Amino acid sequence: MLAGAWLPGLDGVQNLAVFVGAGLLLNLTPGADVALIAARSAGQGVRAGVAAALGVGAGCGLHALAAALGLSALVAGSPWAFAALRWAGAAYLVWLGWGMLRARVTPRMASEPASPTGAPSSFGRVFLQGFWTNALNPKVVMFFLAFVPQFVRADAPHAAWSFALLGLIFSLNGTLVNLGFAVVLAALRQRLGTGGRWGIWLGRGTGAVLVALGLKLALGDRG
């Protein structure tokens, strides 16, 4: 009870260390989020990588909140809502990836973040790319519904708070992992002295990956 007094929901959590460890392993699994962060970090530098990582973290936080409030269960339980989310996510990945594939080399692209069309973009634009890449991913919805409940006690006095707390922990840990990933890749970019042409080809490779992931999401099933 003392734990729950200073941190709501903690008294309803079980096997927290296992949850954190498993969550970190899952955060290291390659996917659209990691591909975007890698492209922005290695292609445009640490500022762009950090923006993408924070955007992904914000999207994950939104999923955690939706799951805690029961909204994710409603989406997952509705074939129409889930299909709409899946198609929106697929369309965004294909659009973002196609923009990277079409980007052209310009002198400024060696040091500035780029928008999906190849033009220099702001921190906020790259942040939103990371946010929507994660927020529109229906697999994250299913992850929160299948994984997180295993670590909430059946007799939890405030199950919603426990769920929200675990979601927050997962989102924060994932953001830290992604930030570290962004910093390492940006440092590697600086050490190798990468130029605009190298960065644009990296972006095109990432674009192809995102298009493939978008098509797979659109043509796949709920699993």
Image (cartoon, rainbow, N blue to C red):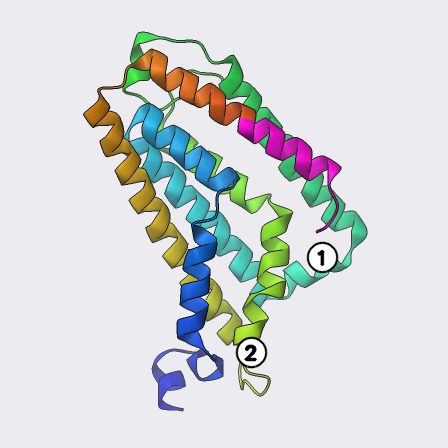
Report which residue position mark 1 lands on: 76
Q: Secondary structure at mark 1?
A: helix
Residue 22 in the image, given as x and y percentages of width and height: 46, 63
**Is residue 67 magenta-colored?**
no
Q: Tag 2's secondary structure?
A: helix
Q: Quadrant of residue 220?
A: top right
Picture coordinates of residue 110 (x, y %)? 29, 16
Of the image marks 1 and 2, the number of the one nearer the N terminus: 1
The residue shown at (44%, 71%) is: 18
Name which residue lies at 40% across and 53% down: 174
Q: Amino acid at mark 2?
A: Ala
| Residue 159: numbered disc | 2
Rendered view: 199 above or below 15:
above
- The magenta span reads 209-223
Q: Which mark is residue 141?
A: none
Q: Which amino acid is tagged 1?
A: Ala
Residue shown at 56% from the left, 67% from the top: 68
